[in-house]
Image (cartoon, rainbow, N blue to C red):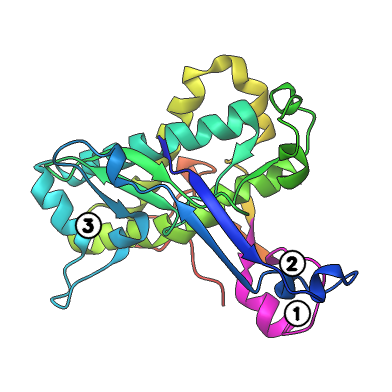
Amino acid sequence: MILLGEIASVTVEHPLYRDLPDAPYQYKELLGAIWREPLGRHLDDGERGRTLAALLQTGSDGRALTAELVARSGLDVRDWVDRLFAVMLPPLLHFLYRYGLVFSPHGENAIIVFDQQDVPVRLAVKDFVDDVNISDRPLPELADLPDGIGEVLLRENPDYLCQFLHSGLFIGVYRYLAPLLEDQLGFPEAEFWELLRERILDCQRRFPELADRHELFDLFAPRIDRLCLNRNRLLLDGYRDRPDRPHAAVHGQVDNPLHSAAHLPAQGHRIVTPAP
């Protein structure tokens, strides 16, 4: 896994709002820039990086980029998807289970590195300014954080940390990738989620000593909260001033397709539906 470092940053503070108690948080983020480490220095000859979001794109001819990548790879679609899961899941799950730490691996922050045959081989992650959260539980791995780090990183409960994978990756990206693969390559959506579940279990089997963490950070709950960012703007917060950045609004729950393979719908039915 490649963690693209943030080399330097600059913020221009407002001369008045910075000193006002409870000033709206937006007025403390008016102008800034981050110099991020480029991906190119980490790539071997013939490798190239594509954002995870690119896998959902289709061309003017209606053909999906992912369908083209699978064809170029020489693999069948199941093996290609399995390679994608093998690249993404082990590092993200290990950070969660071992260290109680999550990134936000959504389509923009996660970059898939492909070899010359367009087979996924590595994962790169960027954006650590406000997209790194740690557990609020007293885990020994978090007891000796460097000075200043523990005060900056947000601490969240285990269920909320799991949402970074559920909402950011599984619902935010895989929810759309699964039906795309079924429509264009004939890979059943139910089989996609079954394979994902099995690869998560494989990661857990590799580290039986972390069984208590697998239970604490439970990715297999029957239902999961549905986070709806648009509700913050349209129904809850609007454009009102508030001193702290709000959490995404929770609006109901959805079935978790990872809960049990036996509960997956029959082929042809969409498993996770968008929020109304």
The answer for how far apart the CA atoms under marks 3 and 2 are is 35 Å
What residue sits 73% from the left and 70% below the top? 28
Q: Which residue is mark 2?
A: 246
Which residue, as the protein is rendered here, is positioned at the far right?
21
Q: Nearer the viewer, residue 176 or 35?
A: 35
Residue 221 seen in the figure:
yes
Numbered label attached to residue 250: none
Tell me the SS state at disc 3.
Answer: helix
Quarter of the N terminus within the rendering: top left
**Span shown in magenta:** 225-250
Numbered label attached to residue 237: 1
Tell me the SS state at disc 2.
Answer: loop
The answer for how far apart the CA atoms under marks 1 and 3 are is 37 Å
Q: Which residue is mark 3?
A: 66
Q: Quadrant of residue 75?
A: top left
Q: Earlier in the sequence, mark 1 or mark 3?
A: 3
